Amino acid sequence: MLTSFFVYFCLWNFSVVAQTGNETGPIPYRLQTPLLDTAWTNNFSTHPWPEHPRPLLRRESWQTLNGIWTYQPSSGGDDLATPPSLPLSQEILIPSCVESALSGIMSSGVMHMWFATSFAAPDGRNESERVILHFEAVDYETTVLLNGKRIGFNRGGFFRFSIDITENLKPDGPNDLQVSHVLVFVFDPTDDAAYHIPVGKQTRDPSHIFYTPCSGIWQTVWLETVPATFITSMDIAAGMDGTVSGTIYSSQNSSQPVNIAILGQSGKVLATYDGFSDQLFNFTATSPKLWSPDSPNLYDIVVSMGLDVVSSYTGFRTISSGIVKGVQRPLLNGKFVFQFGTLDQGYWPDGIYLPPSLEAMLFDLKLLKSLGMNMVRKHIKVEPDLFYQACDQLGLLVIQDMPSMPVGGSPSPSDQAEFERQLEIMVNEHKSYPSIVTWVIYNEGWGQITQPYHPEKQIAERIRKLDPTRLINAVTGWHDHGAGDFHDSHHYAEPQCGTPFYSRPGVPYDPSRIGFQGEFGGVGHVPELKNLWPVQKAVSSIPDTYELNEDLDAYNYRSHQLLDHLRDQVARFACSGAVWTQTTDVEGEVNGLVTYDRRVMRVKATQWKEDIQALYDAAEGRI
Ligand SMILES: *[C@@H]1O[C@H](CO)[C@@H](O)[C@H](O)[C@H]1NC(C)=O
Ligand SMILES: *[C@@H]1O[C@H](CO)[C@@H](O)[C@H](O)[C@H]1NC(C)=O
Ligand SMILES: *[C@@H]1O[C@H](CO)[C@@H](O)[C@H](O)[C@H]1NC(C)=O
Ligand SMILES: *[C@@H]1O[C@H](CO)[C@@H](O)[C@H](O)[C@H]1NC(C)=O
Ligand SMILES: *[C@@H]1O[C@H](CO)[C@@H](O)[C@H](O)[C@H]1NC(C)=O
């Protein structure tokens, strides 16, 4: 870390308070009391998420800007013309959703808002080096001002954007002259009828299966110093035959000599390659240990391009679709591997879209792994990169959904174009994570144009070109028109996975594609009040749960029955994987393996482990 290079200041402690016109300063940060807390709520830091936020492209020279910033709601988009004076009215913890208790704000219904911080220019920086400001995710539209000048704009709540700020930094000089001021204006039109945007499960009027929204800077903000010519991004894929292929992109967009070294255990070089940036490369490593959920072997990578040296990693594995004993199957390293995991919403009562810490995030994933699951379906949300790194390391196959546009209404051509643009960003930004095996375009018709032309057909073809190394689940549930690699049905509670019978809204199984149960289970149980999200609208929607069980014995009995029916379908029919709803309770949904506060474990671990192992055994019997 560049701790010694970047020293940043809380502006109101600093000598430039004179320019603010407010002697009392902002309201100090205070953790708000969430409606429901977790074991990690109070164990948070005012320097949250200290981990390097981009594990697939790391340099030594970086500095987080996470911490206490100032915040102020704003009346409208016109305010951008007259930025407020500093400091803003209230301290806020960054990253966070302004709706969350962790933010210190916990307000709802804000559509326009300002955020501010300041930092000193990198000290002792070589004149030729560049300074890049990275935002990992801001929901939804962001305008960035540095030292009063507009330097960047981004649209989309889930993806990274980066700005070269070198020319706009305050020049080197004594003390306060070096301090640069960042002002961020955010517009989040969730639920505004004029905006049909990818929101996933967020709504300003939450109940039942839709939840509290997230607005603002909800992932890490950081600075990085790079050489004049630097690596901007890398696509790296490694297959079961040892082939490593991809592209190293340079800031010059032109061929620069690059060296790629794949390192084995204890830093031993497994393979090395000399080639050029901005063009496809491929080379072969001899006998790598393959990556799989059972043995998640990863290899470190060092890429050098001129003065730039970056670290990354990969896993050797091949995803494909093929016929095994007459049935279309998803293959991992050439073998049929039955995929079983949960629908994973990634919501938290204290942080909404972002857990209090990495430790909290890992709790959910380790729970799945401990029950013997080998997969997780990341449901209409995109997580911080550390989530995907954890799946790589733990050995969890990831089915990654595109965040859906709102249910109901129909996207205009420009809404649709923006949805597809963001989908391509999702694929490009994440396609080097070995654990991701499948891209999902649409969930249950949400935001899906269902009349012909059936957009998912051409979208699936385009995604296939962007990323030929993975499978595509064009529609999980409901309006299937034959696109993609899967025929995926949703049935609560009873599964119908690749079966020769079907009920509404199902259609007969299409044997030319992989039979998949994209959602089932969903059996619920009302927890004690102390483990429940205490919001009337959420509580009132509990009777809408697909099935409620009186107690945990009944919950486990029904879970066992459903898993056993699924096992029978795996043994008899064309069932290649299934997604259990869901990892945790969320607000008014009470069907988690664990409650929303992660305090009451519903599952009897021994029984579940046996039932899940029985699924793999049934699949093994079909090979
Ligand atoms: C609290 O945070 C510290 C430091 O991050 C960590 O070591 C500890 O395990 C955490 N405790 C709990 C209960 O989360
Ligand atoms: C200064 O800011 C505080 C906190 O926002 C506010 O309560 C106070 O009214 C402001 N004072 C002036 C003089 O603007
Ligand atoms: C910056 O660093 C590069 C590489 O180390 C070196 O060639 C160059 O002379 C340096 N420039 C300055 C102004 O120090
Ligand atoms: C390289 O391409 C990017 C994206 O098109 C562009 O923003 C950038 O200015 C280009 N850089 C150079 C040096 O041409
Ligand atoms: C590897 O690159 C060579 C030429 O650079 C090309 O002919 C070959 O098709 C590539 N192989 C793969 C698997 O991409």
Image: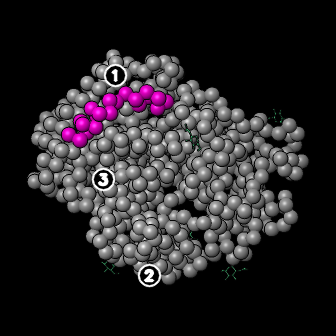
Among the 4 quarters of the image, the one containing residue 590: top left
Q: Is residue 537 above or below residue 313?
A: above
Q: What residue is rendered at 31% in x and 24% in y? A: 555
What colour scheme does the image use? one colour
Front of the two marks 2 and 1? 1
Contact, CB < 8 Å: mark 2 with mark 1?
no
Location of mark 2 (residue): 275
| Of callouts 3 and 1, the N-terminal one | 3
Marks 3 and 1 sit apart, C-alpha to C-alpha, by: 30 Å
Rendering coords of residue 443 (x, y %): 35, 41
Q: Amino acid at mark 3?
A: Asp
Sort mark 1 into few (<14), some (14-19) or many (20+) by Cα contacts within 10 Å: some
Front of the two marks 2 and 3? 3
Q: Amino acid at mark 1?
A: Leu
Label 1 SS:
helix
Q: Amino acid at mark 2?
A: Gly
Residue range in magenta is 594-614
Left or right side of 137 for 75: right
Left or right side of 116 for 286: left
Rendering coords of residue 312 (x, y %): 48, 65
Q: What residue is rendered at 65% in x and 59% in y? A: 63
Label 3 SS:
loop
Location of mark 3 (residue): 294
| Of callouts 2 and 1, the N-terminal one | 2
Marks 2 and 1 sit apart, C-alpha to C-alpha, by: 59 Å
Among the 4 quarters of the image, the one containing residue 548: top left
Location of mark 1 (residue): 552
Ligand 4 placement by image quarter: bottom right
Quarter of the rendering occupied by the N terminus:
bottom right
Sort mark 3 into few (<14), some (14-19) or many (20+) by Cα contacts within 10 Å: few
Marks 2 and 3 sit apart, C-alpha to C-alpha, by: 34 Å
Q: Is residue 571 visible?
A: yes
